[in-house]
Image: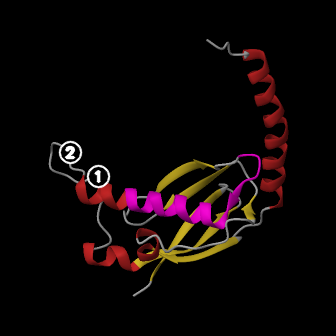
Amino acid sequence: MDSIDIDSMLKDIAEENAYINPRDSQTDNTMVDNQKIIIDVSLNDYLDGKMQLDNQIIVYPHSYITLLFDYPSMEHVTFKVSADNKMKGFTKQELATKVMERFKLLYYIYKNYKTESGKTLFQPVLNEYEYRDNGIYKLKYNKVSKIWKVVLQCYR
């Protein structure tokens, strides 16, 4: 059985963090309030596997992103999401995929999760027939909170 070199693993992690942490701080410092990343993709395209965005250019050089959703629930929900490659950051395709996965999850929870009291976890905003007509238009940055708000759009 092969042995694991813990010291080597810890050294690799330390070297990675020595690059990532300053780069993340630099990215935070250069961000401006209300900065936008335009994504413009419908949920239909995502669900049908037709979402084709640039997967080469890094649009957000950060190891993680905090996303704020105010749809499909009336409550605000945030997710802290790690980049697939923390050394590089997020491509537009990766951001769109991660946002769509969470939007789909929130909608699924709203439609299917009930507590023993019979209440749903979220108060509805969208009707079921409106679900597939929506998509991501853009992400909008808040400099104070360091959170990206997901701005949805109807593609009907």
Q: Which mark is residue 121?
A: 1
Tell me if residue 93 comes above or below residue 28 in the rendering.
below
Q: Is residue 10 magenta?
A: no
Quadrant containing the N terminus in the rendered view: top right
Q: Give percent across and percent down for residue 5.
A: 73, 16
Dot 2 and dot 1 residues touching (CB under 8 Å)? yes
Which secondary structure is most common in the magenta stretch? Answer: helix
For the point 53% across and 58% down, the residue is: 98
Identify the amino acid type marked 1.
Leu
**Residue stretch rendered in magenta on the structure:** 86-105
Q: Is residue 99 magenta?
A: yes
Residue designated by label 2: 115
Q: Secondary structure at mark 1?
A: loop
Which comes before the other along the chain, label 2 or label 1?
A: 2
Q: Give percent across and percent down for residue 34.
A: 69, 71
Left or right of 53? Residue 153 is: left
Q: CA distance from mark 2 to mark 1?
A: 7 Å
Q: Give percent across and percent down for residue 17.
A: 79, 35
Quarter of the image for residue 43 reads bottom left
